[in-house]
Image (cartoon, rainbow, N blue to C red):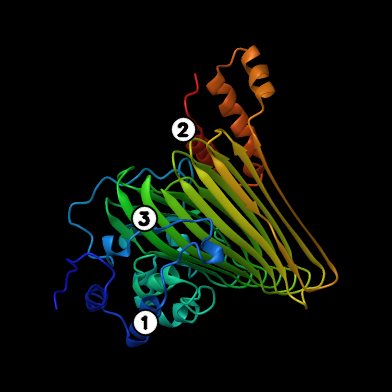
Amino acid sequence: MSSTITETGFTRETFETFLNQRNEPPWLSDLRRSAWETFEGLPKPDSSMEEWRRTDIRRFRFDRFAPPGPVAETRPVLPEPLLARDVELGGRTVSLDSRPVESHLEKQWADQGVLFGSLEELLAEHTDRIRPHLLARAIDPGTDKFSALHAACWSGGTLLYVPRGVVVEQPLHALSAMSPRGVDLGRTLVVLEEGAEATLLAEMGSTDPEAPGLHCGAVELLVGPGARLRYVDLQNWGGGAWHFAHQKALVDRDGQLQWTIGALGSQLAKVNQHVGLVGPGAHAQVNGVMFAENRQHLSYHTLQHHEAARCSSDLLYKGALQDSSRLVWRGMIRVDPNAQKTDGYQRNDNLMLSDAARADSIPGLEIEADDVRCSHGATTGRVDDEQIFYARSRGLTRNEAIRMIVAGFFQQVFDRITIESVRHALGEAIGRRIRQYD
């Protein structure tokens, strides 16, 4: 069998070729083969399934893509990282089409036992430390066909491992790039041991803003007792990319997580974001910024799962839509019977910039404990014509007025983000997408 994938499609043949290219231990190959069997046995999701009822993927075809191959010798110009501007980084890692390109970690953090860089490379060097966390706690390969495909063919990816009590004071940055017709099956694994602290800025971008591509990824955030993680995830693929992802965080006793999502790119995105509060006193703040244009379809399903007592969660998603785009947000707060003293909140607000756009907001509660405080809310509305008139009467153009209104709409989320460069990057990225109305 050839050692290079030349065929198109996720087939048994291309999967075996993919495995033969890799020098991996038998336990990992066995996990991949088991996931592949699951992938072959699961149907492609369709509108008959409740979770996919509002997301149509009939135009997506698995046979147009294939498992990742070697990085080409001639690399395209990588997309400009937005989150790393004006930030003194403690380390950075870059991948292209699911293959490692470069990585760097400042010596002061490496000397304290921090691991940061390509997941597959670090797994080979530190198997005993990483194996217990890999594909073991957060992501279930049997969830759907995309989670199974990822578990079978994941490649490259990013690892951040912070030992007990280590506080990484400088943010770390990870860039995942994709070339035309490329495939990104990267996995992000973050492990913070007890009392550790870190900030990871992760972003995705295409080398060609219009070319097709496929991202089928996963994120696992494991926050240990008393640990604190700030994680920013900016999905900024080009307009031809398909984006499928399963993302889950587990926050242990008295741990704290601030998770910020930016959903700006791709032609279609379907993401499951799950936060599990598994230790007493755990806290999670989840922030979402979504902007859709043209015929984009962005669908995010969130779950705040309270599994232990005295935990709190606070989710705020805000989306703006123009042209014929569509946003779908479906959120759930689930409280287990022993999760007394729960404090959970979720909110989704949408701003319509076009009569042809559509937003679906579906909040929900599943509460099995009797001593809780949980609530939710959702709003959808158009840009206020009176606000536009007032701004224009002060000398602004209509487009400047709309930009100002959109910026104000997202400000509540931006105020939660503690990293100034991230706030500015998200604001500028959204501002550039607003149509010229004059």
- Quote the CA–CA distance across marks 1 and 3: 24 Å
Q: What amino acid is at disc 1?
A: Glu
Element type at mark 3: loop
Nearest-to-viewer mark from 1 and 3:
3
Q: What amino acid is at disc 2?
A: Arg
- Quote the CA–CA distance across marks 2 and 3: 28 Å
Residue 10 in the image, given as x and y percentages of width and height: 29, 69
Q: Where is mark 3, residue-wise?
A: 59
Q: Residue furthest front?
A: 48
Q: Nearer the viewer, residue 112 or 372?
A: 372
Q: Compare marks 1 and 2 and give the one earlier in the sequence.
A: 1
Q: Relative to 423, does residue 58 appear above or below in the rendering?
A: below
Q: Where is mark 1, residue-wise?
A: 37
Q: Compare marks 2 and 3 and give the one earlier in the sequence.
A: 3
State left or right for residue 232 relative to residue 228. Answer: left
Is residue 282 among what the camera can see?
Answer: no
Q: What amino acid is at disc 3?
A: Arg
Is residue 405 among what the camera can see?
Answer: yes
- Quote the CA–CA distance across marks 1 and 2: 44 Å
**Looking at the rendering, in which quadrant would you find the N terminus?**
bottom left
Q: Where is mark 2, residue-wise?
A: 432
State left or right for residue 354 relative to residue 281. Answer: left
Q: Identify the image quadrant of residue 128.
A: bottom left
Q: Residue furthest left?
A: 2
Residue 76 in the image, given as x and y percentages of width and height: 24, 48
